[in-house]
Amino acid sequence: MEIKKCTMCGCEKIKKGKIHGMAAVVPLYYRTGMFGSALIVSFCSKCGEVLDMKVANPDKVKYQNEK
């Protein structure tokens, strides 16, 4: 679902960005930062409020018992 308007200030200009590197999503109790995925973030261009976050590649977040 596409976000059309900021819930904090009402601005209709929403931007997207990416969080990656050390902030990548990895399994909760994983000891290394390998095999994670970036987060895609939708935020207000006026006030900076983060409106939505999504794991870019959920298939890259592997758990030990998953194949």
Image (spheres, rainbow, N blue to C red):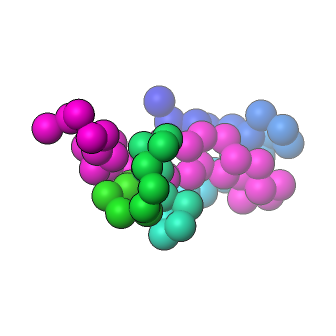
Residue 18: tell me if it is visible: no
Residue 32: tell me if it is visible: yes
Residue 41: in magenta span: yes
Q: Quadrant of residue 6?
A: top right
Image check: 51 left or right of 36?
right
At 31% from the left edge and 58% from the top edge, which residue is drawn? 35
Please tell me whether residue 22 is drawn above or below residue 47 in the rendered image: below
Q: Position of residue 58 (x, y in %)?
A: 33, 42
At 77% from the left edge and 48% from the top edge, which residue is drawn? 49
Q: Position of residue 26 (x, y in %)?
A: 43, 50
Q: Position of residue 42 (x, y in %)?
A: 59, 49
Q: Nearer the viewer, residue 32 or 40?
A: 32
Q: Position of residue 2 (x, y in %)?
A: 50, 36
Give the total of numbered labels.
0
Image check: 7 left or right of 33?
right
Please tell me whether residue 16 is drawn above or below residue 4 in the rendered image: below
Q: Nearer the viewer, residue 52 or 1?
A: 52
Residue 34: in magenta span: no
Q: Residue furthest top?
A: 1
Q: Quadrant of residue 37?
A: bottom left
What range is drawn magenta here? Answer: 39-67
Q: Residue furthest bottom?
A: 21
Q: Which image quadrant: the C terminus?
A: top left
Please tell me whether residue 54 is drawn above or below residue 39 in the rendered image: above
At 49% from the left edge and 41% from the top edge, which residue is drawn? 28
Q: Nearer the viewer, residue 63 or 36?
A: 63
